[in-house]
Structures are given as structure tokens and as C-alpha cells.
Image: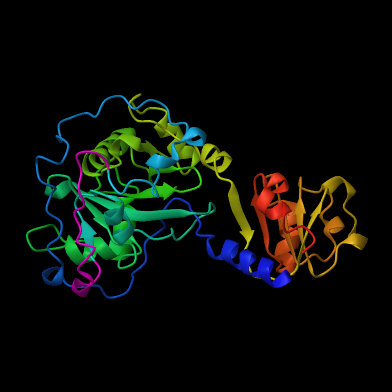
Amino acid sequence: MGRRWGVAWGVLGCIAACAGDGSGVDAVGPDVPDLADAPDANDAPDSSDAPDASDPMGEVGEVDVADADESDSGTGPDTRDGWSCVLDADAPEAGPTPFAEWLGCASDFAALAAPPLDAALAGARSLKTVIDRADDAHLYFTNVTLFPVHYDFCRTYLSGRGLPPVPDLGSFNASEYYAPQRRFLLGALTFYEGANAWVYELAPYDTASSAMITSAFQALRTHAYIGAELAFHPTSSAIEARAAELAPDIPVVTTSALVEATRYQPLVLGATTGRLRFIAASTLTPAEVGPRDVVVLDAVPDAPERMGIAAASITSARQAPAGPLNARAMDRRAPNLTLVGAWDDAALRALDGQ
């Protein structure tokens, strides 16, 4: 049965698509299609289907990610009442869509999103957002596979052709993440699957004011089918301070809330084969753990050397990424993860000793 568990572990490793701020200091990416080749798939939804852009959408209130309804998650209904898909998922011959101006359904988001470049939470998917203040605050949801960073998209599609030129990379980074009079509002729309949360995020070093955050947030809320579910996620202490200035109708969800609502936390990725064993952390000794054991613990052991030379470790309690158990696993390149509730998980218990 070791082979069976080895396959299961490999799946856990493969789904460790991390989540973070969805941004990063931009660097020049690969060649992308010319504007003339872009598919014409970004017309706004029919006015009878799309919400009124002037509708403030009501007061959202605080977000309780731990109690989110699975039926409203990204794996739930493909769209929401009054919305319809914008991108044509049945026309792959046209090639990847470089951007959209509206998101009408889950398929639209999936066509543009990918796991973030820099992340710490599993199960996240994210796309970049660009608002061009030099063009009547035009909003773009950009394809992060084609444009891993904001600069790639802005230089390709928003430079010239009647618009102000986009400068070199260094000047772009200096102005568009730090300058009060910047041209663009840059961010990311991210779905955290474990927390069932849709959030708008900035790069942690972005100095956007609370007024800029509000403007961008309201634009995303109006142009995306999940607008009423959207929250703002501060990605640094400096941004968290500015988030405190936001109006009550912009809900804020903290990193700690996202972590607490996430059951699966991959720490050291990898694949291994071994015998699954449940051992209480308080009774753990190196002598009882061998190199073919995949150990499930009810808690994080106070002395990681008690893990011996286990093939892999799963803790039912959350670990600190910088904690000694994970540091030891990194040194040994042994897969290590948190799976909240693993100690009492019936499916895993059925494999104990196999």
C-alpha cells in the first residue's frame, strides 16, 4: 500500500499552487502578440445583463472567510445572476486572450489567471489588473501567462497609438509603484481556494493612497461578476495602515484570516513513497521512525530531531514556515505539510500502517 500513499502524496505536492501578493517588481518578459492580433473578445456584457456601473452595489460588510459558502466559491456556479461570460472558451484556435475588460464568469477568470509568482498559501490563482488613468480610468484584466508582470502588458498595449508612451522598465517601476501622480493603478485579483475568498491586492511595496485603492477596488467590483464578494487584502503592514482609512463598504481581509481559513499548507514540496503512520507528537521518538515512514502528527513536536529520518511529515496543527520542524525538513529535502484536521481524517486513518 506504500505505492498508493506515494501517489496521494504526489497529488498533494502537485496542488501546492501558492498564493501571495500577485505582484512583484516588474522585469521584461517574453514576446507577446501585437495589438492588431488581439482577439476582439472584450466587449462589455450586454447592458441588460451587466450591473449598472453607477450602482454602488450596497454595503458589503466584513468578510468571514472561515464561514464562506462553498456554493459561491470559484468551484461553484460558473457565474452570478445578471452576468454572462465575455470570453469565448470554445475558440482555442484564436490563441490565448491577452486581456479582458469585464469578467462575466468563472471561465473568464480561469482563461486569464495562473498561480501567483510569489506565494505562501496553496490553491490560489491570480491575474493582473491595470487601470489607465490617462485613458479615462480604463480597466484591463490581463493574462498573466502572456504577461507575468504589469510592465509587459503596459508597454505592449498601452504605449503610443494615441496614448502616452510607456518609459523604460526602471522608470516605470519608480513611477507606477511609488509616485503620487502615477499614470497606472496596478494590482491583482486573486482567488484563495482554501479560504474561499476573492481579494484585490497590491504589491507589498506599492505606496498607493487609500483614495487610489478605493478607485481601483470600485472599478473591479463593477467590472467583475464576483464584485459583491470582493475584499481588499493588505500585503504589508504599510498597506494595512492605509486600509484602515478605507470606507466601511470596502471589506478588508487580513493574511492571518486567510491562513486560518486554509486547511492545506504545503511547506516543503516533493514526492515520496512510504508507510503512513499516526504518532502523537508527545510520544514521538527517533527510534520508532524510519526512512520509509510518512508520519502524521497531532501537533508540531517541540524538538524536531524527534522526527528521526522520516520520509515525510504531516501535522494536524499549523506550522510556522520558519519553525524548526520545517527547517529540518528543508535541510533533508523531506516533504512536509500542514493538513488541519489530518489527525482525525477518516480517509487518512483508513490507511494507517499501510
Q: Nearer the viewer, residue 23 or 207?
A: 23
Compared to residue 299, the image places residue 92 above or below, namely below
Task: Please indicate whether residue 182 sits to the left or right of residue 287 in the image.
Answer: left
Residue at left offset 59%, top offset 64%: 13
Image spot of residue 80 (x, y percent): 27, 41
Image spot of residue 141 (x, y percent): 26, 54
* Residue 72: quadrant of the picture: top left
Image spot of residue 198 (x, y percent): 39, 43
The mark tally for this picture is 0
Residue at left offset 54%, top offset 53%: 120
Compared to residue 90, the image places residue 74 above or below, namely above
* Residue 328: quadrant of the picture: bottom right
- Identify the residue at the far front of this view: 350
Task: Please indicate whether residue 95 sits to the left or right of residue 1 in the image.
Answer: left
Magenta stretch secondary structure, dominant: loop
The reply to whether residue 332 is visible in this rendering is yes
User: Is residue 82 shown in magenta?
Assistant: yes
Quadrant for the N terminus, please: bottom right
* Residue 70: quadrant of the picture: top left
Task: Please indicate whether residue 274 sits to the left or right of residue 173 in the image.
Answer: right
Image spot of residue 268 (x, y percent): 64, 62
Compared to residue 352, the image places residue 1 above or below, namely below
Residue at left offset 16%, top offset 72%: 34
Quadrant for the C terminus, please: bottom right
The reply to whether residue 320 is visible in this rendering is no
User: Is residue 208 shown in magenta?
Assistant: no
The residue segment tinted magenta is 80-96
Residue at left offset 45%, top offset 32%: 241
Q: Nearer the viewer, residue 215 or 76?
A: 76
